[in-house]
Image: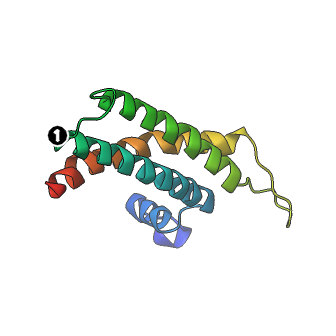
Amino acid sequence: MSADRGYRWWLATRWRQWRNPPPPVVRAVAANLAVAIAGSLLVLAYDVALTRGATLPGGDLRALLVAVYVVLVLVAGSLFTYLWVALPTGTTGERRRSGWSAMLGLFTALPMAYLVLVVALQIVKPLLG
């Protein structure tokens, strides 16, 4: 394959895609990241309080709190992505939303919830002592 025929090397193509992501993807990641960070701060605060010996009503509910956190990120991330990410229509001024926007948010929310929670509990928590 010659360079004069418009062929790009696989890595060059992936690098270009990474540098220029589509705006709907950036918005979906930003919406889910904001929800995941806010929720993980609450989980982290609860976990640190229990680790330092605080007695909270209900006892140790960390497993339930993590499950609620994941559901919250999935639902709120999908909703915010649905509201913020409009599908391209080709006409100016017309904005459309569909279930695909919410699905984009859902597919972005699950790994985002997990990654942010891992960073909060495995990296930030030990730094807090």
Image position of 81 (left or right of 63): right
Residue at coordinates 16% horizontally, 44% vertically from top-left? 52
Report whether residue 1 is seen: no
- Tell me the quadrant of the picture where the C terminus can be found: bottom left
* Amino acid type of the residue tagged 1 in the rendering: Gly
Image position of 96 (left or right of 74): right
Residue at coordinates 62% horizontally, 50% vertically from top-left? 81
Residue at coordinates 45% horizontally, 33% vertically from top-left? 68
Residue highlighted by disc 1: 53
Quadrant in which residue 124 is drawn: bottom left
Residue at coordinates 49% horizontally, 43% vertically from top-left? 109
Residue 92 image position (x, y, % from top left): 85, 67
Q: Residue 101 or 4: which is nearer the viewer?
A: 101
Colouring rule applied to residues? rainbow
19 is higher (above) or lower (below) than 87 = below
Q: Residue 26 or 48: which is nearer the viewer?
A: 48
Q: Provide the secondary structure element on which disc 1 rests.
A: loop
Residue 32 image position (x, y, % from top left): 51, 50
Report whether residue 47 is seen: yes
Residue 108 image position (x, y, % from top left): 51, 45
